[in-house]
Image (tube, grey):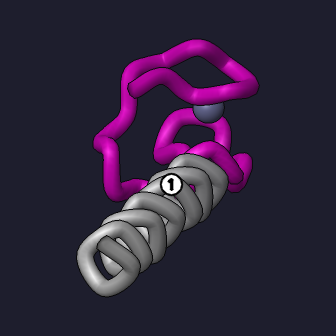
Amino acid sequence: MKCHYCKESIGRRVKQCPHCGKVNPTVNTQEIILWTIGMSLLLYLLGWVSGG
Ligand SMILES: [Zn+2]
């Protein structure tokens, strides 16, 4: 991924940019979105399986 501030490429798991020192919030946001989608799918599947 790229740094939100200086556009330098940084590691996916790196929260703080080694180039400009700014903390990038994108990693956390993406993980929260993935978690939300995953949990929704799981609940939907569970309801579908148990409800028929
Ligand atoms: Zn940067």
Q: In terms of depth relative to the viewer, which is nearer, 43 or 50?
A: 50
Q: Which image quarter holds the N terminus? A: top left
Note whether 3 is above or below 40 in the view shown. Answer: above
* Whole-percent x, y for residue 23 in the image: 69, 54
Q: Position of residue 44 (x, y in %)?
A: 45, 65
State the image quarter where residue 13 is shown.
Answer: bottom left
Residue 7 at x, y = what percent? Answer: 58, 14
Query: As displayed, is residue 9 above or below residue 31?
Result: above
Q: Is residue 33 visible?
A: yes
Q: Which residues are magenta?
A: 1-26
Please tell me whether mark 1 sits on a helix, a strand or a loop. helix
Residue 24 visible, this orientation: no
Q: Is residue 22 left or right of residue 43?
A: right
Q: Residue at x 54, y 45 (%)?
A: 17
Image coords of residue 8 (percent x, y): 48, 18
Q: Residue at the spot x=57%, y=28% of the render?
A: 3
Vertical comparison of 26 with 3: above or below: below
